Image (tube, helix red, strand yellow):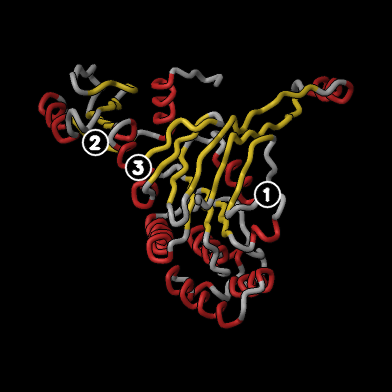
Amino acid sequence: MPQVVVRDLVKTYRVAERDPGVLGALRGVVRRRHRVVEALQGVSFSLAEGELLGFIGPNGAGKSTTIKILSGILVPTSGDVRVDGRSPFDDRIAHVGRIGVVFGQRTQLWWDLPVIDGFELLRDIYRVPAARYRRSIDELVGLLKLESVLHQPARQLSLGQRMRAEIAAALLHEPRLLFLDEPTIGLDAPSKLAVREVVKRLNRERGVTVLLTTHDMHDIEALAERVIVIGHGRVLADSPFDALRDTVLAERHLRIDFSGPAPRLQLPDAEEVTCDANSVELRFDPGRTNAAALIARIVAEHAVDDVHVERAPIEAVIARFYDLHGAGDGA
């Protein structure tokens, strides 16, 4: 039986609107105008125990809304959600004791308290026995390299230190299900690697089920075995990461900075994305050609200052899915 089951999940918001300026504000008092925002439009998926699922999509796609519903923070407009057989929002007290949640732009630590005091308060909230708490805290402090910050107020931590502390806080009660919403946003490379390593160990060694949302495709590549792509509140794809990587996610972008004005490149295996005064950005399929061959061909004919190869932005991936599915921006 799946640990998480989501069926036909719909979430709509009623948002107030008014015209700009003083007159618009006065008209808004007399006659308020609203529009309906459809954050989720029939989202369905399941998650097996011990699975690590990557949930990707652009801002506004519905990722955080889904996490908040699964966490019991939001109630859906319609649809059914079951986590370990229970409703997250109807049985919230029992539910939150079995899950861990990290929001990259929110904090569960007390801003003015030392980190260790925040951990102690969470221990009381979750009623973690003393021996179990000591075992958890010793392991998490070592894994996340928190020894030097335990006695600092949370407000004095760097972003990377705070995120590592947030992950430790979410794991103190040893949950079997972990929701991570943009846990590496804004982190430097060492902090990202530390977070990835902890998530990987929890999943591989302890069998903790993980649902991870991120804009960083390196996070997905390092961690996820399965990926759901969501856009405009709809599931666009749900497949193993390897299968997805060999199709839409295979695209690469090559940016070339020229010593002089950018030439108009005519390359059979690459398509121009943007062109400005001294730079050109191309996209190509590494299954048809490789970056080294493209670069060699360009350098042989033009004076080049620098080159950059990177994955396609997640927004471009979503746009490609819409092209494949025949959906427009108003979907």
Nearer to me, 265 or 41: 41
Q: Name the residue at the bottom extreme.
A: 131
Is 282 left or right of 130, judged from the image as shown?
A: left
- Identify residue type, mark 3: Phe
Nearer to me, 80 or 130: 80
What is the CA distance from the residue labelled 3 to the residue labelled 2?
Answer: 28 Å
Q: Badge 3: few (under 14), some or many (20 or more) residues near its Cα, within 10 Å? A: some
Name the image quarter holding residue 98: bottom right
Q: Name the residue at the left extreme.
A: 300
| Numbered label attached to residue 241 | 3
What is the CA distance from the residue labelled 1 to the residue labelled 2?
Answer: 45 Å
Residue sitting at x 42%, y 60%: 203
| Numbered label attached to residue 307 | 2
Residue 148 appears in the figure: yes
Residue 77, how many percent across, how many down?
69, 35
Residue sitting at x 39%, y 31%: 317
What is the CA distance from the residue labelled 3 to the residue labelled 1?
Answer: 29 Å
